Each structure stands twice: as structure tokens, then as C-alpha cells.
Image (cartoon, helix red, strand yellow):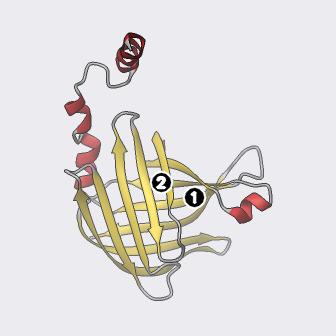
Amino acid sequence: MRAVAAGLVLALAASPAAGQSADEMSGPSGEHEALQNLAGRWQVEVVLHGAGGDRVAATGRAEASAILGGRFLVVDASLDEGAPAEQVVYIVGFDRRNERYQVVNLDDSATYLVMAQGARREVGGWVATEGADDDPVMAAMGLAKEFVFALDLDPDGGWGVQTRFVDTRVPERPEQDFMTVRFLR
């Protein structure tokens, strides 16, 4: 029992949260405050990126709300008929323990959700989070389905979530823009 307790003490001392109490680490931080600033009503614009160039695929509206004491932002968007999905939900948070953003995406075009998380890797002013999906079609081809949710968290000019697919067929693993969802006042 003493060995377990000593191991726990060493693990806590070596953690990024060393020197901070559990209460300090469990409460919202500056990153959470930035997410809370995105709460409210928004107009939505969905832009699809493709070989023929960018095109606005849909518009709609969204309501963003801070939940769990400001620890997460839930965005519920309704898009016009004909959009890739008509109902989209994002849950965005920041994990203080590991210093990384987290994004969960659900929509009415599928029966599964996708998640991404990542440290603050700035890409063109956007914060990139990375995820993978166990897509059986991709797996049958011997490929992995990987993607990036890039977050533009500046509420002044609107904010956005961009989906980029990672081309896992080549060693360079380039990111290919797929869709950008912009939230505008």
C-alpha cells in the first residue's frame, strides 16, 4: 500500500499540474473564458472546399452555450435543407491537465461521432486538433481515416471550425481542406 501511495505522490509531482491544487486545475482557465466568449446566437455559413474551388453549400443559424461552469461550449447548428447535414452539434473544450483543446462533432448524416484533440499547434492563426476514426471502409482498403478540426476562436470577425482530411496514403500526410463552418454575428 505504501508503494502505491508513494507512486501516486511521484506521479502527481511529475504532472504538468504540479504546484496547483485539484480545485485550481478543475476550474476554468483563460482558454475556457475564450470559449465562453463564443456563446450566443450566430448565423452559419458552410463552405465546401473541392477541386472546383470553394463554394457556399449552406447557411443556417446556431446557438452556442457554455456548460458545466464554463468548461465546455456546446454549439447546436441548424442548416438549410440540402446541406451535407441539417443538424450539427459541436462540443468544444480545453483540457488543462494536458494543455490541449478537444472537439466532439455529431451530425444527422451519421450514427457516430468524431473526436479530435490536440495541443496548441497554430496553423495559419487557427488551433489544430487531430483525430482518427475507425472507418471500416477505409480500414478495408488498408488506410486510416485521420482528420484535423482547426478552430478559429476569434469572436470579433466570427469564428469557425474547419475540417481537413489527412491523406494517409503518402508519407508526407498532407492535409486537404474539406469544409469550413463559419459562425457570424
86 in relation to 70, above or below? below
Q: Quick check: 124 left or right of 12?
A: right
Identity of the residue furthest to the bottom in this view: 81
Q: Quick check: 12 left or right of 142?
A: left
The answer to whether residue 124 is seen in the rendering is no
- Gap between marks 1 and 2 measured at Cα: 8 Å
Disc 2 residue crowd, few under 14, some 14–19, many 20+, Cα 10 Å: many
Label 1 residue SS: strand
Q: Which mark is residue 164?
A: 1
Point 45% across, 89% down: residue: 81
Label 2 residue SS: strand
65 in relation to 80, above or below? above
* Residue of label 2: 150
Q: Quick check: 168 left or right of 44?
A: right
Q: Amino acid under label 2?
A: Ala
Q: Which mark is residue 146?
A: none
Q: Amino acid under label 1?
A: Arg
The answer to whether residue 69 is seen in the rendering is yes
Image x and y of residue 145, in percent:
66, 56
- Given residues 107 and 44, the one toward you in this image is 107
Point 32% across, 25% down: residue: 17
52 in relation to 12, above or below? below
Image quadrant of residue 165? bottom right
The C terminus - image quarter: bottom left
Point 64% across, 57% down: residue: 134
- Given residues 81 and 180, the one toward you in this image is 81
Is tag 1's residue or tag 2's residue first in the polypeptide sequence? 2
Kindly indicate whether the residue at mark 2 contacts the one at mark 1 (C-beta within 8 angstroms).
yes
Disc 1 residue crowd, few under 14, some 14–19, many 20+, Cα 10 Å: many
